[in-house]
Amino acid sequence: MQLGREQRYTLYKDYQLPDNILSSHSNATRLLYSSLFYPRSTTLLFNAMKFIAVTLACVAAVLATDVRYDTAYDNADQSLGTVVCSDGSNGLLTKGFSTFGSLPTFPYIGAAQAIEGYNSANCGSCWKLTYGGETITVTVIDHAGDGFNIAEESLNVLTNGQAEHDGVISATAVEVDMSECGIPA
């Protein structure tokens, strides 16, 4: 697309971009000059940069999540009254579950950083954790400082029986619909 001479001038009073800048430089240089001197282009450029930054931040959050085990989540008879997702409007007791073993995904349960604290809106959220070609679906019922703390049996599935040996792994975590964990909304 060829720009007309009047389109080559900036919107700034009495300032013109020299013709040789627009004709003799690469597309990237012309884009830079146009974004600097044309406010509309600048807005579009900044919006694109913000979109890219947010997208990269989301991808980075999914790529590397620490996952470790806590044997407390292996106890099927443990009361849900002992975790932050117990009662309250978002609690699991109010949805008809009473023990860890009553949850449809047991023993694929645990704690996650996504649970901010008591009665979090993320209580009962469902996550797919993937490591070394294995994927499990976990119901989150408690708060973790960072990443995920899951039942040892769950981590053994992800690590081919190496939970105790590995201790902490770096897995991918993707939140999925709660219905995949059998938890009513």
Image (spheres, rainbow, N blue to C red):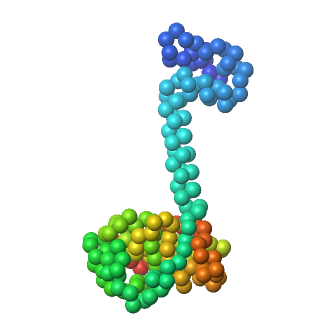
- Nearer to me, 139 or 145: 145
The picture quadrant where one finds residue 162 is bottom right
Please report the residue visible at 50 percent of the width from the left and 38 percent of the height from the top: 47
- Nearer to me, 100 or 41: 100
Image side of residue 179 versus residue 34, left or right? left
The picture quadrant where one finds residue 125 is bottom left
Image side of residue 63 versus residue 105, left or right? right
Please report the residue visible at 66 percent of the width from the left and 20 percent of the height from the top: 22
Q: Position of residue 61 (x, y in %)?
A: 54, 58
Q: Position of residue 26 (x, y in %)?
A: 71, 27
Please report the residue visible at 43 percent of the width from the left and 89 percent of the height from the top: 76
Is residue 133 shown above or below 4? below
Quadrant location of the C terminus? bottom left
For residue 60, say whether it is visible.
yes
For residue 102, say whether it is visible.
no
- Nearer to me, 163 or 31: 163
The picture quadrant where one finds residue 30 is top right
Q: Position of residue 123 (x, y in %)?
A: 37, 71
Please report the residue visible at 41 percent of the width from the left and 79 percent of the height from the top: 182
Is residue 172 shown above or below 26? below
